Amino acid sequence: MNILQINASARSNGAQSTRLANSIVARLSTQAPGASLVLRDLALQPHPVLDEAALQALFTPAEARTAEQSARVALDDALIAEIQAADVLVLGVPMYNFGVPVQLKNWIDAIARAKVTFQYTANGPEGLLKGKTVYVALTRGGVYRGTELDSQVPYLKTVLGFLGMSDVRFVYAEGLAMGEEGVAKAFADAESQIEAALA
């Protein structure tokens, strides 16, 4: 089993979403002792945003790209290769202002590439990253699961499904801004969710 862990917090140390993602990976590693892990921390390894120069590079045929354009496309290629090689994906996703962190959006923009990770067909779009299981470790200061204020889950289901990843399992640690007791309760509940998600 090849596991790809993406830590999307702006914090490289002490992130609750990383703590939760680590718990999922630890449980996966117990179930599959020979599993390999690729860890990408988007705070420590920030990916450039999709800007005009990046778009020009991506839409320029490979043989016509400048050295600078080739280098920019290669950054995205590396992320795509990581996810293509993964059997299991673990995303550590905090809630920032009711959405996903910009670091995660940059990563999604990098891996979503027409004719590589998705394609348009006569029957509509087809995701090409199939056969993967995705665990999403969601951490929130408040409690938003199942409410209209949770824009993260619909967005992630949509974009991951568009890319072919339909087996997406969410683990929640909520109420983390509600004191030490709230944090302890949230992570105890999350551990139960992990156990159920990996059963």
Image (spheres, rainbow, N blue to C red):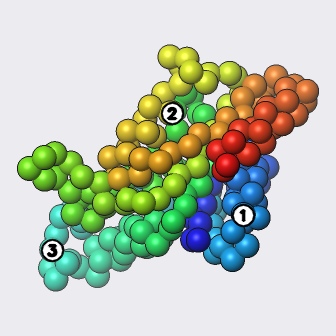
- The residue under label 1 is which amino acid type? Gln
Mark 1: secondary structure = helix
Image quarter for residue 186?
Answer: top right
The furthest residue to the right: 181
The image quadrant where one finds the N terminus is: bottom right
**Does the image show residue 93?**
no
The CA span between labels 1 and 2 is 28 Å
Name the residue that disc number 1 marks: 31
Circle 2 packing at 10 Å, graded few (<14), some (14-19), many (20+), is: many
Mark 2: secondary structure = helix
Q: Nearer the viewer, mark 1 or mark 2?
A: 1
Name the residue that disc number 2 marks: 152
The spot of residue 181 in percent (x, y) is 91, 27
Mark 3: secondary structure = loop
Check contact, mark 1 vs mark 3: CB within 8 A.
no
Is 119 situated left or right of 129 in this image? left
- The residue under label 3 is which amino acid type? Pro
Q: Residue at x 77, y 39 (%)?
A: 192
The spot of residue 27 in percent (x, y) is 74, 57
**Does the image show residue 145?**
yes
Circle 1 packing at 10 Å, graded few (<14), some (14-19), many (20+), is: few
Image quarter for residue 161?
Answer: top left
The circle on residue 141 is: none
- The residue under label 2 is which amino acid type? Gln
The CA span between labels 3 and 2 is 35 Å
The CA span between labels 1 and 3 is 44 Å
Name the residue that disc number 3 marks: 61
Circle 3 packing at 10 Å, graded few (<14), some (14-19), many (20+), is: few
Earlier-in-chain disc, 1 versus 2: 1
Image quarter for residue 88?
Answer: bottom right
Q: Residue at x 90, y 30 (%)?
A: 180
